[in-house]
Amino acid sequence: MGRGRFNKRRGGRGGGGGRDGGGAFARDFKRQKRGDDRNASDHGGHADIVRENAQFEAYYKAQKIVPEQEWEEFLTSLRTPLPMTFRINGSGKFATDLRDNLEGTLFAELLETKLVDEENHEIPPPKPLAWYPERLAWQCSYTRTQLRSKPILQGIFDFIKTANEIGSISRQEAVSMIPPFFLDVQPHHRVLDMCASPGSKTFQILERMHGDFEGNAKLPTGFVVANDVDLKRCNLLTHQTKRANSPTLLVTNHEAQNYPVIKGPKGEVFDFDAILCDVPCTGDATMRKSPDIWTRWTPGNGNGLHSLQLKIAMRGAQLVKVGGRLVYSTCSLNPIENEAVVAALLKECKGALELLDVSKELPDLKRSPGIHDWQVWDKFGYHPSFDGGEEMYKLSRTMFSDEETKKLPLERCLRLLPHHQDTGGFFVAVFQKVEAMEVPADAYTKKQAMKERIRLTLSVNAQDEIKMSHEVYQLVSKGASDVVPPIEGENGEYLLPHRGAKGPNGGSRWLGIDPVLPVNDPKVINSIYDVYGIRSEDIALHKNCVTRTLDTSRPKRVYTMTDSLREYLACDVGESLRVTCCGLKAFERQEIKEDDEDDVCDYRLTQDGLPMMFPFVTKRIIRPTFTDYKMLLERRTLAFEYSADAPQRAVVSDPETKKALLDLTLGCCVLVPKDEDLAAHNFTMQDLAIACWRGRTSTNLLVSKAETIHFIDKVRAVPVLATESKGEAPMETA
């Protein structure tokens, strides 16, 4: 996590706490630097900050979360800048190839070179995180200044900047990578990330959801809901997770403690197999990244958030299914935000939750056990008991350890201390639900239902006051809050309603949020099916496509989702969900002025959606030579004919490739190297499929420049002989 959490959550509102959820402390942290789940790389700006706080030392010595013999090492670590860490995204061949390339090139030279910092202290070379599988996460102790100023580090700086932009890696604090592993996500799971922004953990969850999915015709059958209370941060969350290219993702904007309950037609609750409660917290375990916390920390900081944290965890406990996992985590060292919340949750759930022993999971991760007894402090000092009678400030009974608390297996919690593996601090508790619990409706649903009754009352009142009273009575007596069944298709599956069509002017009732509307116009869907050779039996675009455009007969963008996500949205007939992002952008409208062409589709494939759609596409696929493929990546365009007016333009060199392109009508196509070239260099078709535009005189990439670099990196080591002859331009090096 390591998020500087208050700044992230704007006053502890990550779960929706608002003013009574730690807002006062949040305002004290207004200037705390942003970044969330990302590392502070340039520590020069914090040089003048005093990394000492007598209250902090006294408080945590009293809590005894650090063994006495390790105390000085603990403090020394907190005063040392946090190393930069990143993980390689995805799995399979490309991830391991990228790792091997890093180890064999950029990092190999550094292992043989001794580097020192400004104070002549040796800087350790990059190393993999010992506990992260397959050496796919790395730690570097270089500051941004060092990366920019030392020539030998320039390659690492360029790599991290570019690879993070295109999604090959994610810069993420080491301890923030831990919670998704304990969720044990499977491809068929329904997963909820309750306080998800900025999205690094959600990205990990999506990767695990897809497993070893490499573009084959088997999609995950589950889905992932990523929620955040701040609408602007939902946009950041969407940007961060779009690189996963997943049709299983739904981004929502709600208070976590009041996350909506979605029910099926028989009243059954849509519960979740795995829920992550990475709750808003004081973030005092992130001092290495945000050292300004030193001067702002007080003993009572965590007290204002305890209630909110417990409410969010309780909502997660209600929504997780029996047998499912709930992971509670913070980037705080404070037992009031950690063990006290865990103990209160176990008591309130009355045996429905079991705190799991996960000591054998991630065995190379060094951890400290949770504690059973702690001290509660506020601005008046230490309070041994809630019933002491002395004056207290913002304290509650659940913050205190009692005899029942001491019998709970709190040692199964894990606390990560910064000096153990040169990281930030962290706390994790892993639960399994063993019994069913009552799931109350969220506050918004009740409030909205009352508003709708009032609107109905006023509408009738304008016509006949006596009739109005009668109709209101009938409305209540008939049970207006009963579950409304979703729309059913011919095969009994639930179909998407026109979400948002009930709002003013045909838009969504959620102000500032575009409606989610189904795309089922036969003219749109059948055109996509026919032109790209996609079979409805393989992927049901006619049921699983949506748009945010009000005119669904001519949507600007078309998003596709999995069956399970469509059913979840379909059962939300009351539109309780405030949806900011849904599914994967698979198609975009294109303009082709070609009236005499029959084989023309108004929609082109997007590169974002291609990894998912490619296995189902059987038409408009061109198989160029590796020479032409690499040339197209490097030049971004290939002309069909040499022109003396533009001698610098690259030209398609292979006659078969040229003929195949010219045989196509204008519009989108997919280019993939020939099978023999793929086999010779150990690539699959999905690895190198790119979206292109077949124009009148040339073919052009429909891939961003950053994504193009990603593909060039994939094929960089593949030798290509460029032939220079009349009608062909010499090949350039990328």
Image (cartoon, grey):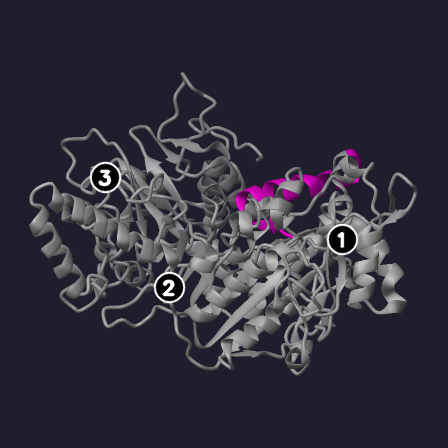
Residue nearer the viewer, 21 or 513: 21
How far is disc 1 from disc 3 in space, using C-alphas?
A: 56 Å
Secondary structure, magenta segment, majority class: helix
Q: Residue furthest right?
A: 120
The mark nearer the N terminus, 3 or 2, is: 2
- Position of 258 relative to 429 (above/below): above
Residue nearer the viewer, 415 or 244: 415
Q: Which mark is on residue 456?
A: none
Can see residue 212? no
The mark nearer the N terminus, 1 or 3, is: 1
Which residue is tagged 1? 126
Where residue 602 sits, quadrant-wise, is: top left
What residue appears at the point 36 percent right and 28 percent down from the top-left corner? 641
Count up the numbered dots.
3
The amino acid beneath tag 2 is Leu
Instruction: Please tell me whether mark 1 sits on a helix, a strand or a loop.
Output: loop
Quadrant placement of the C terminus: top right
- Residue 583 relative to residue 326: left or right: left
Does 153 lie within the magenta span?
Answer: yes
Which residue is tagged 2? 219
Residue nearer the viewer, 572 or 350: 350
Q: Position of residue 635 (x, y in %)?
A: 48, 32
Q: Which residues are magenta?
A: 149-172
How far is disc 2 from disc 1 in space, using C-alphas?
A: 36 Å
Instruction: Please tell me whether mark 2 sits on a helix, a strand or a loop.
Output: loop
Which residue is tagged 3? 504
Where residue 285 sits, quadrant-wise, is: bottom right
Does 56 lie within the magenta span?
Answer: no
The amino acid beneath tag 3 is Pro
Q: Position of residue 552 (x, y in %)?
A: 20, 43
